[in-house]
């Protein structure tokens, strides 16, 4: 088996990242259970939303060697996800002031009541307008523009007979010439099989043509800005197909941008399970790294791909993923999902560029008996850095190399 290598980082070197907020762990998305610890975790009580608190958290994360921070803007009053570009711009200002070398990433989820209202009033681009912001105007180095709702395009292609997906195997098959595909305008409920909070999997109603037009707009804007594109895989077969399509078969697709970061969210759904072994982890990293190897549309422009990994395991599922580590210097030690992911990413042949931890993905830590504990982003970053060190991995801190990481 070929050793995985990165275009951007050296073996045993990682960019330590934090997904600071997220979209699903909010007060309105969680149905209270009466379990104080579980409710605090699932409602996002540990997420700072006041600007002064955010500044202190950015500074603490920077001091812990965090150099990538992924952000879904939160309304400081309601704690819910917001589309307010002023909030994004203020967070970007805070990042420049308190984490000056850190790469920034913005999300664009369709989840949440305030996001839904903005879409009804302003149109689909309201949720992703931050992709069009230049850094000087409050923009980010990366903006995630393919995650869950965009998979409507894939299911539409399936219905029209252009592709067949095999969810259990995580593969797909192209059946017809994709250049003939015309997205459907039928508006329907976005039903996606994912693990989430009570309201966190509610993506509302949309259509394949709306989502395709949105993807094309984001590609245009990121290409014009000379900034990187970012996607999240939440189901192996459908997510990998859509990224493959944008990179290799879509006319004027991702090769116009030249730079792509793929985030693998292990555990986000039954179709992208948390890996039981290092070999299964490495298999998906390998698949992501190879996504731009062949251009069907005849576009030979290079597309540089990096890979980040996150453990998107709900608190109620955490205990099921505690098991002995099967690789590296800590092999045999019982670990929960976040620690196992950090250990996997820290292996010299992992092929990973960014190790992503934080409240968006696993908003908790586990005590020695496997019980849930609320956790801050800083606590998770500290533990991830410890696991990295025990496995011989070091954080990338070079400002010059970080500055070029998000460009083509």
Image (cartoon, helix red, strand yellow):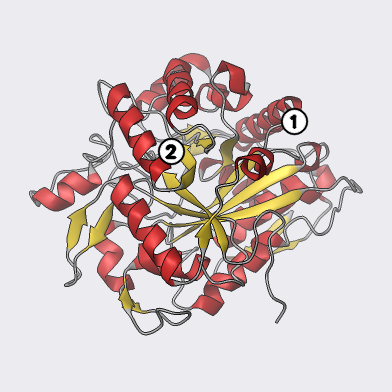
User: Which residue is pictured at 73% across the width and 28% down the height?
Assistant: 220
Question: For numbered disc 1, what is the local secondary structure?
Answer: helix
- According to the picture, the residue beneath numbered tag 1 turns out to be 223
Q: In the picture, residue 314 is in which quadrant?
A: bottom left
Tell me: residue 92, above or below residue 309.
above
User: Which residue is pictured at 89% across the width and 46% down the height?
Assistant: 299
Q: In the picture, residue 400 is in which quadrant?
A: top right
- Please identify the quadrant where the C terminus is shown: top right
Q: CA distance from mark 2 to mark 1?
A: 27 Å
**Side (left or right) of 358 relative to 392:** left
**Side (left or right) of 366 relative to 7:** left
Crowdedness of circle 1 by 10 Å Cα count: few (<14), some, many (20+)? many
**Side (left or right) of 27 relative to 111:** left
Residue 362 in view of the camera: no
Q: Earlier in the sequence, mark 2 or mark 1?
A: 2
- According to the picture, the residue beneath numbered tag 2 turns out to be 203
Question: Residue 331 or 35: which is nearer the viewer?
Answer: 331
> Tags 2 and 1 in contact by the CB under 8 Å rule?
no
Residue 23 in view of the camera: yes
Tell me: residue 319, above or below residue 200.
below
Image depth: mark 2 or mark 1 in front: 1
Crowdedness of circle 2 by 10 Å Cα count: few (<14), some, many (20+)? many
Q: Position of residue 158 (x, y in %)?
A: 65, 54
Q: Position of residue 32 (x, y in %)?
A: 14, 44
Residue that lies at the very extreme toward the bottom in this rendered image = 332
Question: Residue 120 or 96: which is nearer the viewer?
Answer: 96
Tell me: residue 152, above or below residue 166.
above
Residue 93: mark? none
User: Which residue is pictured at 70% across the width and 82% down the height?
Assistant: 1
Q: Position of residue 111 (x, y in %)?
A: 40, 36
Question: For numbered disc 2, what is the local secondary structure?
Answer: loop
């Amino acid at each position: 088996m070929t050793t995985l290598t990165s275009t951007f980082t050296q073996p045993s070197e990682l960019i330590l990242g934090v997904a600071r907020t997220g979209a699903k762990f909010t007060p309105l998305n969680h149905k209270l259970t009466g379990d104080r610890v579980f409710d605090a975790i699932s409602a996002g009580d540990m997420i700072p939303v006041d600007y002064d608190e955010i500044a202190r958290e950015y500074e603490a994360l920077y001091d812990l060697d965090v150099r990538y921070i992924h952000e879904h803007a939160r309304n400081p009053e309601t704690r819910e996800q917001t589309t307010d570009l002023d909030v994004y711009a203020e967070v970007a200002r805070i990042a420049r002031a308190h984490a000056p070398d850190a790469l920034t990433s913005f999300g664009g989820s369709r989840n949440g009541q305030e996001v839904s209202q903005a879409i009804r009033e302003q149109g689909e681009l309201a949720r992703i307008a931050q992709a069009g912001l230049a850094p000087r105007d409050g923009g980010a180095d990366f903006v995630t523009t393919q995650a869950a709702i965009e998979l409507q395009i894939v299911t539409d292609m399936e219905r029209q007979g252009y592709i067949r997906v095999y969810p259990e195997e995580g593969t797909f098959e192209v059946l017809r010439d994709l250049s003939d595909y015309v997205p459907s305008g039928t508006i329907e409920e976005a039903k996606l099989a994912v693990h989430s909070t009570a309201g966190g999997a509610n993506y509302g109603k949309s259509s394949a043509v709306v989502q395709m037009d949105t993807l094309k707009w984001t590609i245009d804007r990121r290409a014009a800005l000379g900034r990187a594109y970012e996607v999240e895989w939440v189901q192996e077969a459908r997510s990998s197909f859509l990224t493959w399509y944008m990179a290799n078969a879509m006319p004027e697709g991702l090769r116009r941008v030249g730079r792509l970061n793929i985030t693998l969210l292990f555990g986000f759904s039954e179709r992208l399970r948390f890996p039981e072994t290092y070999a299964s982890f490495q298999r998906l990293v390998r698949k992501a790294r190879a996504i731009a190897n062949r251009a069907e549309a005849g576009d030979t422009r290079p597309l540089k791909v990096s890979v980040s990994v996150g453990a998107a395991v709900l608190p109620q599922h955490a205990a099921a993923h505690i098991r002995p580590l099967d690789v590296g210097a800590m092999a045999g030690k019982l670990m929960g999902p976040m620690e196992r992911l950090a250990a996997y990413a820290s292996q010299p042949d992992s092929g990973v560029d960014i190790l992503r931890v934080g409240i968006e993905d696993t908003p908790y830590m586990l005590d020695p008996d496997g019980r849930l504990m609320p956790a801050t982003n800083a606590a998770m970053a500290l533990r991830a850095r410890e696991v990295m060190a025990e496995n011989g991995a070091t954080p990338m801190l070079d400002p010059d190399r970080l500055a070029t990481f998000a460009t083509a």
